[in-house]
Structure formats: structure tokens, C-alpha cells
Image (cartoon, rainbow, N blue to C red):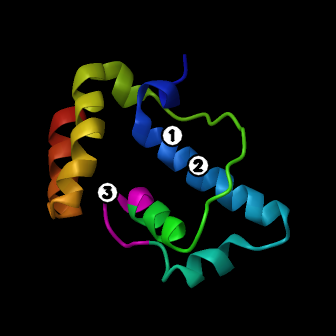
Amino acid sequence: MTIAAVVPALDEAARIGATLDALHAAGIDEIVVVDAMGGFPDQPLMEDLEMSRRLRRRGAMPTVEREVIVSGRRFMAHPWRATLCCLVFPPLYDLGVPPATLDRVWKSVVR
């Protein structure tokens, strides 16, 4: 089992990466796409979720079947805490909790 299979938030990040890879393979440079989306969000956490939402608003996101390798260090050290954060943070972000606040909680809980 991969980390991405355990943590849904990583699956979202993988889809974004795969989408940008697919666009690059089609001859479209990633920077053009990122610029068209208003730039990559300058925030300490949830930037991948914000960018995926921007991409989704612009239309359907292509998906590419691809394995993503990520560091599982924090999940290995604190599996329950890290997983809980990944499940709770997106709804908190949707409710307006600032990314900086979520980042402080993340650092205090899993680092």
C-alpha cells in the first residue's frame, strides 16, 4: 500500500502533478498554466488544494495513471495524528481557517 492510498490529500496532489505532466507532455509549459490560474498560491499549507480548485473551475482535469513517490516520514512517525490532520484540515480550510493557523497546528502535531 502506498502513502497516497492511505491519505486522500496526497491523491489530490498527485492528480495536480499528473495534470501538469500531461499538459507538459502535450507541449504546454506548466508555467503558462500556473500563470493562467493567477499564480501558485503563496500560503504555507493547502496551496495544492487551492490550485486544484482553480484548475477544476477552469474545466475538467485530465488524469494520468502514474505512481507518485512521496516521503512518508511524518506519517511513519505519527500515523494517526498525520492522518487526522489530512482528514480535518480541508474542511477547516473550507470554513475559513487561515492556512497559517493550519500550518502551526501541523507543525506542532506531526513535526
| Residue 111 shows up from this direction | no
Q: Is residue 62 left or right of residue 109?
A: right
Q: Which residues are magenta?
A: 41-49
Which of discs 3 and 1 lies nearer the camera? The answer is 1
Q: Which numbered dot is residue 39?
A: none
Q: Which numbered dot is residue 45?
A: 3
Q: Which numbered dot is residue 11?
A: 1
Q: Quadrant of the N terminus?
A: top right
Q: Quadrant of the C terminus?
A: top left
Residues at marks 2 and 3, CA–CA distance in whole angstroms: 17 Å
Image coordinates of residue 77 in percent, x first then y, are: 31, 21
Residue picked out by circle 2: 15
Residues at marks 3 and 1, CA–CA distance in whole angstroms: 16 Å
Residue 31 drawn above or below residue 1: below
Query: SS class of the residue under badge 1?
Result: helix
Question: For the residue marked with disc 2, what is the amino acid?
Answer: Arg
Which of the 4 image quadrants contains residue 86?
top left
Q: Is residue 67 left or right of residue 36?
A: right
Residues at circles 2 and 1 in contact by the CB criterion of under 8 Å: yes
